[in-house]
Amino acid sequence: MPLSADSPLTELKGVGPKLAETLAGIGLHKVADLWFHLPLRYEDRSRITPLDALRPGRTALVVARVERADLRFGRRRSLVVSVSDGSGRVLMRLFHFSKSQMQSFVAGQWLQAFGEVRPGPKGLEMVHPQYRLLPDPEAVELSERLTPVYPTTQQVNQTRIRSLVDQALQVLDDNGPRELLPEGVVDGVGGGQLTQALLYVHQPPVDANLQSLAEGRHPMQRRLVFEELLAHQLALRSLRQRVRDHRSMALQGDGRLRQEFLKRLPFRLTAAQQRVIAEVERDLAQDLPMLRLVQGDVGSGKTVVAAMATAAAAEAGAQTAVMAPTELLAEQHLANFAGWLQALGLNVLRLSGKQKTAERRAALAACAEGSAQVIVGTHALFQEAVEFHNLGLVVIDEQHRFGVHQRLALRDKGPGGLCPHQLVMTATPIPRTLAMTVYADLDSSVIDELPPGRTPVQTVVIADARRDEILQRVAAACAEGRQAYWVCTLIEESDALQAEAAEATAQRLHRDLPGLRVGLVHGRLKSEKKTLVMQAFKQGELDLLVATTVIEVGVDVPNASLMVIENAERLGLAQLHQLRGRVGRGSEQSHCVLVYHPPLGELAKARLQAMRDSTDGFEIARRDLELRGPGEVLGTRQSGMANLRVANVMRDADLLPAVQRAADQLLETAPERSEPLIRRWLGDAEKYADV
Ligand code: ADP
Ligand code: MG
């Protein structure tokens, strides 16, 4: 039987059950999977590079003669073979080699070698190039096409996987993949039909523009990128649909609690907060589940928005669950929500794994009976068997640590299997087109305004050798009656080590700044103790607060106008921005001192530069995305961006609006194509649920 798209891989030459199993492990089950198993990059073995034209960092094919071969006994034993072609010389360095290999490198022996060129102590080197001995230079084997390099695993080498893809591609002409893009869309994207694009990308001709292929900007690649982005878009919309197939309580109260809430608030809402609250209220009044993302910079006042939504739910008689990514943030939310809402007669409860049995049992009961209207906990709250009386709203803080999966699991948590409304708040604001892609399953609201009276923080970057200067700054700020943070960072995840380092720093600062009242908080302190120290700092009884990154979230002391962050080069941009958000909350000019330990790597330098240049969370997130890529910034599993094969949402951002339109058009005119498109690019069902 001839091969078809659905033929199992065991029907290919050289594939037995064992190899098939290995291939299944990397998502390759059938012939069609190989079509969409796209190259990571290309190697050019179609032409010979003269040795005097070699450049470090480039990969090249060379033809040359052995001059000599020497065993070196450095840190690692290596065989160094010096070869030349008359124009120049390069050293081939091998760490693993057999005796016969060693003996084959006799002076005058011709060979061809392919590999990456690097600078070495004695000129350019190729470390472990692929090489072949040649009887004479004319015997060189040149490839007729660019050589694709595929993602694979250790058990399956490049030659093997190339041969499998080649076999699969032979079916492409007669039995190729169905074109699933609507016709007009295909023309708009360029790059032609799918089959054509696939063939080109797997087997680019030698005259292909290697540069544009290497950058992923070739029209044929863009054709595939477009389709892949479309598949992701459709997958997220389908997830959204899976939630929206359910019904919710329509939460439309009389506004009484909300009016009371606003009356007691010590400030006026910003216009942006009012707008977003109105958007949320409109959603809540529907009997379809709200799926809304609230983006806003640090300090833009997202918590108040969530509290208003909670009050609205309570007016309609529904419970709200507030979910935070960490225990500390849950504490903070509890303090805020309880402070605002208990005055309105609502019962706000904390649910935590750390609670004593009796306390926890009481909390669970209040939750199940409905005597608690607001329940605050971590994301783990829902992984346990927590029963609600009439859960109408779930507030989820910090989307990037919360999976779509978890959100799907909320579907029937409401009374009678109704789906609670979902309000997601994120402090990692991202550009609009990107948000529409990554959060395509959510409607989005943006708080694009900070409360009045905030002054942008001035940031300086200083090497740790200038510690004296930094101490002077701290002393000067405190002498003026202001307060300061000193943030200690450690790479180690361990609370214990962080705590130790913070303690040592606090002692040292105590010695170096004898006039100041120094306090200390870290993750190891009991929460009562932590609260006491924070209160003392808030009330001005401490001048300097030494802290680990536990103060990243929630802490709010307007009189603190200076923040020193040690080893700032170790932290990511999002974290630095969150930390810095603790100052600049009053009307005085605030400062942030980013202290680094030289030498600085390129990435760290770029990060610190970004912090110095901007205080705008959107801009900082954009830089972060550029530097690290969306998978890292947004959390890979949640954003699904880890599953992308050819697309890169930053590089391909210009396609995103057209992708949105194509998704609309496809769902309108050919909805039956959505499922196969998703399956083609995202694979089997489990993976797809993990978008
Ligand atoms: P984030 O968006 O970072 O979660 P918060 O909700 O924690 O911000 O708010 C930061 C601080 O600003 C809090 O102290 C909050 O009470 C205060 N705040 C919020 N909205 C306003 C406003 N409209 N005017 C003045 N202060 C506000
Ligand atoms: Mg917050």
Image (cartoon, rainbow, N blue to C red):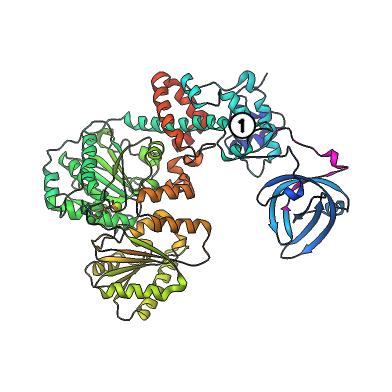
Query: Quadrant location of residue 414?
Result: top left
- Please give the count of numbered marks on the rendered protein: 1
On the question of residue 368 being in view, the answer is: no
Magenta stretch holds residue 263: no
The image shows residue 96 at horizontal and vertical percentages of: 75, 54
Q: Residue at x 73, y 37 (%)?
A: 46
User: Is the residue 361 above or below the residue 594 in the image?
Assistant: above
What kind of element bears circle 1?
helix
The x and y percentages for residue 355 are: 30, 58
Question: Residue 394 sits in which quadrant?
Answer: top left
How dense is the environment of label 1, judged by Cα within 10 Å: few (below 14), some, or many (20 and up)?
A: many
The yes-or-no answer for disc 1 within 8 Å of ligand 1 is no
Q: Position of residue 415 (x, y in %)?
A: 25, 36
Can you say which quadrant of the picture contains the C terminus? top left
Q: Quadrant of the N terminus?
A: top right
Residue 134: in magenta span: yes
Q: Is residue 509 above or below residue 181?
A: below
The one nearer the camera, 320 or 563, is: 563
Asked whether the viewer can see residue 632, the reply is yes
The residue where tag 1 is placed is: 201
Give amino acid for label 1: Val
Left or right of 628? Residue 252 is left
Where does residue 528 sit, x and y in percent of width and height?
27, 66
Q: Which residue occupies 50% across, 27% down? A: 189
Q: Is residue 79 left or right of residue 526?
A: right
- Determine which quarter of the picture holds residue 209: top right
581 in relation to 622, above or below = below
Q: Which residues are magenta?
A: 126-145
Toward the viewer: 159 or 464? 464
